[in-house]
Amino acid sequence: MLVVGNLEKRYDTADNEVLALSEIDLKVEEGEFVSLLGPSGCGKTTLLRIVAGLASATAGRIMLNGKDVSGPGPDRAVVFQDYALFPWMTVRDNIEFGLEARGMPVAERNKISNRLLSVVQLSDFAEKYPHHLSGGMKQRVSIARALAVDPGLLLMDEPFGALDAQTRSVLQDVLLGIWEKFRRTIIFVTHSIDEAIYLSDRIVVMTARPGRIKCIIDITGDRPRDMTSPPMTKVQREIRDILREEIDLSMELEKADIKGVRI
């Protein structure tokens, strides 16, 4: 479904040029759940934004369903960490926003929003406003809004990163339920090894800046996964060992950035 070929991203700063991503080659099959995992500053979000069409690559190519990606499109939807809901709109209106922008009749919009409100367990909050909702509820609205436009590819940028551990765990199960129901292709950015293992078919482990793909790990086993089982703890240790060197290097890069030294 998605093909990323020899992707590179450079940024021009006031002092120098920064190579953020280099030699990214990745294929994602339809219906897969793929997580991007790596140290801070490795370019996970940058890669996601380029796939979304919200940022441009310096070099390389992205193809979705055989067509070049050159900007945002209705075949992709993004869920951000900060919810990005319209505070003056009700929950229902937020979910229907993209549908209304397409000129869909009210009755059809309501049918879709009713179904999604049920899926994310917010039917009783349809006429409430975002300030009435908890963080977890707001993120469920964001997910429902993204699904409303029926994207083939759902891009999620640390959507649960700002939530407490209990809410995060609940929403992971909600997301898996949605994924199993709709079977959309998902690319999911996270800093959590356990979250990546619990949710994903495959984990793309990235290096410290410039971000490259260090390895891709297949996660097997039925969902929901028992994270205390020997197979899961073995994968946890494997990924921690792989990431340790990259996290140390990332910290050295951050120190160098603060001192204005190039590594």
Image (spheres, rainbow, N blue to C red):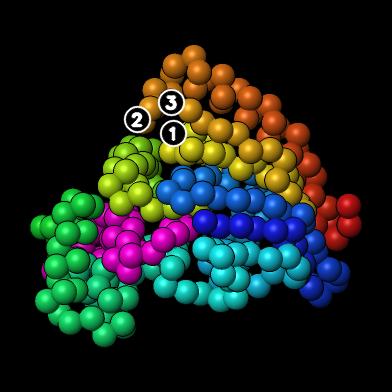
Q: Is residue 129 magenta?
A: yes
Report if residue 68 is visible in the image.
Answer: yes
Residue that protrudes farthest toward the bottom in the picture: 103
What is the spatial separation of the Cα atoms under label 3 and label 1, in whole angstroms?
10 Å
Q: Amino acid at mark 1?
A: Tyr
Residue 208 versus residue 51 in the image, above or below = above
Crowdedness near tag 1: few (<14), some (14–19) or many (≥20) residues, C-alpha within 10 Å: many
Q: Residue at x 52, y 56 (%)?
A: 1
User: What segment carries the magenta color?
Assistant: 127-156
Classify 129 as above or below 43: below
**Residue 198, numbered label:** 1
The residue beneath circle 2 is 224
Q: Which residue of the protein is positioned furthest toward the right in this rendering?
A: 262
| Left or right, residue 141 beside residue 168 | left
Image coords of residue 133 (percent x, y) = 24, 59
Say which label, 2 or 1, has the lower sequence index. 1
Residue located beneath label 3 in the image: 221
Real-space Cα distance between discs 3 and 2? 9 Å
Left or right, residue 11 beside residue 126: right
Q: Between 227 and 8, which is closer to the camera in this rendering?
A: 8
Name the foreground residue: 66 vs 143. 66
Whole-percent x and y of residue 211? Answer: 73, 52
The residue lying at 15 percent from left, 80 percent from top is 106
Q: Amino acid at mark 3?
A: Gly
Q: CA distance from mark 2 to mark 1?
A: 7 Å
Q: Nearer the viewer, residue 159 or 181?
A: 181
